[in-house]
Image (spheres, grey):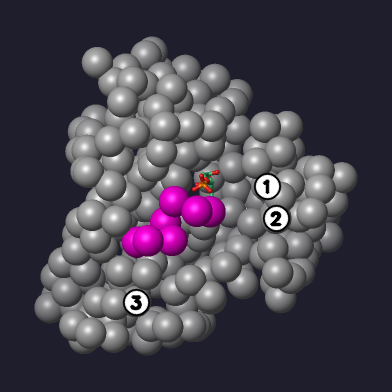
Amino acid sequence: IGTIVYEDSTSASKAIAQEIADLIRVKQAQKQTCVLGLATGSSPKGLYAELVRLHKEEGLSFSNVVSFNLDEYYPMEPDSVNSYVRFMKEQLFNHIDIIPENCFVPEGRLTKEEIRIYCEQYESKIEAFGGIDLQILGIGGNGHIGFNESGSLQNSKTRLVALDHITRVAASADFSGLEKTPRTAITLGVKKIMEAKRVILMAWGEQKANIIKASVEDEVTNKVPASYLQEHRNATFVLDKAASSKLT
Ligand code: F6R
């Protein structure tokens, strides 16, 4: 596992955007689709802003990009202010030339009975596009990746999960209180994340420093799903100074 430390999240986000732009252009030259795995939350906002800038100012086209988001709350209406569909449109999709039909975010509007087959189909769709070329991740304070909370197995599939209390507390400000915060979500499983050809996990701020140390330097454990990335062939943790401050 590699770690790269930048002075701040802005310069780090620009470097990640550049890697993504390079990959998209290589795939374009080969007339291939570029499959991106995308995250929501506060961590990738600067990255998405830079990708929008690269599109508007430097002519980067996303016409050959297919994207799969990691997760969505359940239940969730796609046009709700808190939906990850809405987040992705506002932060990225509405501002670039990606084909809307190529943007996949887990559906938050299914019946309980539909979820299982839906999750299988989400994974099949990823496989049909040849797998994820580059997966973007944030990390929860408990070490979750996507919504694979503590205890998630390395071969876990895309599924409905119960959110940890700490995850719900972190989200509760957006939902105006813990009671209104969803208790469940649909997440891409750890297995598909581990199958991505390239993984970039980003973390900013000293509130992430302890979990970054645990993920990178302590033993691989299902208590900290991000620690599985130690066993990935091509994963990099991109950090700002504060998030790296507990690393030895
Ligand atoms: C979001 C996701 C989560 C977040 C994580 C960190 O799609 O999968 O794992 O990446 O909770 O969230 P922020 O970036 O808000 O600290």
Between discs 1 and 3, the one toward the N terminus: 3
Q: CA distance from mark 1 to mark 3?
A: 26 Å
- Quadrant, the N terminus: top left
| In the image, residue 83 lies in the stretch drawn in magenta | no
At label 1, counting other C-alpha atoms closer than 10 Å, the crowd grade (few under 14, some 14-19, many 20 or more) is: some
Res 107 quadrant in image? bottom right
- What amino acid type should be assigned to the residue bearing mark 2? Asp
Q: Which mark is residue 174?
A: 2
CB of mark 2 within 8 Å of CB of mark 1? yes
The residue range painted magenta reads: 41-47
At horizontal 23% and vertical 81% (from top left) the residue drawn is 60
Residue for badge 1:
171
From the viewer's perspective, is 35 left or right of 152? left
User: Any atom of ligand 1 within 8 Å of the CB at mark 3?
Assistant: no
- Residue that lies at the very extreme toward the top in this rendered image: 219
Give coordinates of residue 13: x percent, y percent.
Answer: 29, 56
- The numbered disc on residue 52 is 3
**What amino acid type is highlighted by mark number 3?**
Val
> How packed is label 2: few (under 14 Cα within 10 Å), some, or many (20 or more)?
few
